[in-house]
Image (cartoon, grey):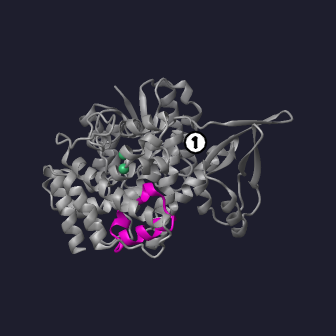
Amino acid sequence: MAQIILIISDKELKTILQNKLVSSYGFDVLTKETVAEAISMLEILPDIALVVCDIMTGKEAAVKKMYDYLEKNKADFSNEIKMVLLSNDKTFYPNCHIVGPQPNHQKLIKHIGFLLGKDSGNLDFFYEPPKELNEAQEESKTTIFQMPILSKPVAQATTKIKFDQLVVEYLPISSKYLLYLPETEMNFSAYTRFKKGNEFEYNKKITEGTILKKEDLDKIILRSGKEIYIEKQEFSMAIDYLNSLIIEKLQNYNLEPLHRVQLNSDSYEILLDVFKKLSFDKSSIEIIKELTKSVDQMANSPDCMELLSIEYQKRKICYGYAHSQISVNLLLAISEKFSWQNDISKNKIILLALLHDLTLRSDRLIKLHHRYSEESKNLTEEEKQIILNHADDAATMIEKMVKSPQELLVLLREHHGVRGGKGLSNILNTTILPVNMAFIVIEEFVAKYLAIIDKNILENKENETIMTKQQIDSILNEMKVKFEKTTYREVTDRLQKFFAYA
Ligand SMILES: [Fe+2]
Ligand SMILES: [Fe+2]
């Protein structure tokens, strides 16, 4: 029977946890007053699976001691011992399950059950509605992933360079991060890479210990390509810091829509890079979680589609994000008229739109795969395979990364209308979930909508950023011929009504 140690001061919570964790799951619960006592238990009892700790004034060093002890000795335990921390502080305890200082008791019990494999967990657990959101937005709560400890090693290709006897390895990260660096003393160095003959050379652009100036940063951004490079020894610290800047920015609920659109697009590109390199860590999950809320907030912003169209035409935002955000906006706008919307949470709709194409690994393939029948002749075999497998890959990856609801996995896997997620359906499959049928219709609309903007860019029609009613009607009339079946047809009709009244 799994054992749990509680080192918490809240007597009420302690009693509830003691009773409920035993009665609900049969766990053996031990309470300890000090970390030293808990450590002596850990040394003699083999079945301790989890420690719940709080941070009280004056006790912080003790909690750090507990954390350090578990981190340092993890190789000695046959199973990983999880630590749940009643705090908001993620800075010093990166591998803990942070649940806030005063978590809802019922949710905490379920969450502990989930962490120890006895419960499906509560997917709302980590959601704290931002204080700045008003009552009206309260109902638009998003559901958030669980955050298991992800210890998957970073799987980027590394480059080893030998200077005298010293071997330096560099790891690439998305240069989008540079856009969010403040003027500050840097605690890591960053490099750009260029090819010289058959070798790569690295130029130091940011030097550890120097103060970064805005004008220098602007120059670096201008000259860096899609990636910047960090020395391997500094990589983990640098990526944690850079991710925390993005997360902090996303958590600013008062951003202007223009800035939010840009930030969402950059965050999307960072995630695309993470999916490409399989370099998930806890902060990637945190970015997904915050971006989900930010996409939701953007969807509530007036004139969102117009802003997205303008920024996309100016090439300020990437295709993948523009496509996802417009799809969310439209799906939310029309779904309230359908009975199936009762079965699907808003959060799943946003996650579907946000995550479904990230396994395509590049913005270019995201764009091309929406026109696969016309574009396949221009694609390599490898690119075709990536496209044909991406829906299944998306579901598989998310399933491995986090504890996610089965329905979301089905939605991701079948977003091209194929059961099992391999290939792209040429027929209108009526055996998939209605929300997938609606998504297929909306994806087609968005692809055609963005194709008109792409054409404007090619033809230098900078002034034609706003789509006319005729252009929208012509897209929808064309779609009506294709989508002649049941739900597909109803969604197309609903879109037409939506634009008629917009
Ligand atoms: Fe898509
Ligand atoms: Fe797709």
The residue under the point 69% across, 59% down is: 223
Asked whether 301 falls inside the magenta stretch, the response is yes
Find disc 1 in the rendering and name its residue.
65
In this rendered view, identify the residue nearer to me: 218 or 21.
218
Judge left or right: residue 340 versus residue 43: left
Q: Is the C-beta of the residue carrying label 1 under 8 Å from the nearest atom of ligand 2?
A: no
In this rendered view, identify the residue nearer to me: 291 or 461.
461
**Quarter occupied by the N terminus:** top left
Judge left or right: residue 451 versus residue 411: right
The residue under the point 59% across, 62% down is: 180
Regarding mark 1 in the picture, which secondary structure is present there?
A: helix
Q: Residue furthest right?
A: 164
User: Which secondary structure type mostly characterizes the magenta part of the structure?
Assistant: helix
**Quarter occupied by the C terminus:** bottom left
Say above or below: 120 vs 266.
above
Asked whether 395 falls inside the magenta stretch, the response is no
Q: Residue furthest bottom?
A: 463
* Image x and y of residue 247, in percent: 50, 58
* Image x and y of residue 161, in percent: 77, 37
Q: How many marks?
A: 1
The amino acid pointed to by label 1 is Lys
* Image x and y of residue 167, in percent: 78, 35
Magenta residue span? 295-322
Q: Residues within 10 Å of mark 1 (few under 14, many from 20)?
A: some
- Can residue 252 be seen? no
* Image x and y of residue 201, in percent: 77, 44
In this rendered view, identify the residue nearer to me: 413 or 188.
413
- Can residue 291 be seen? yes
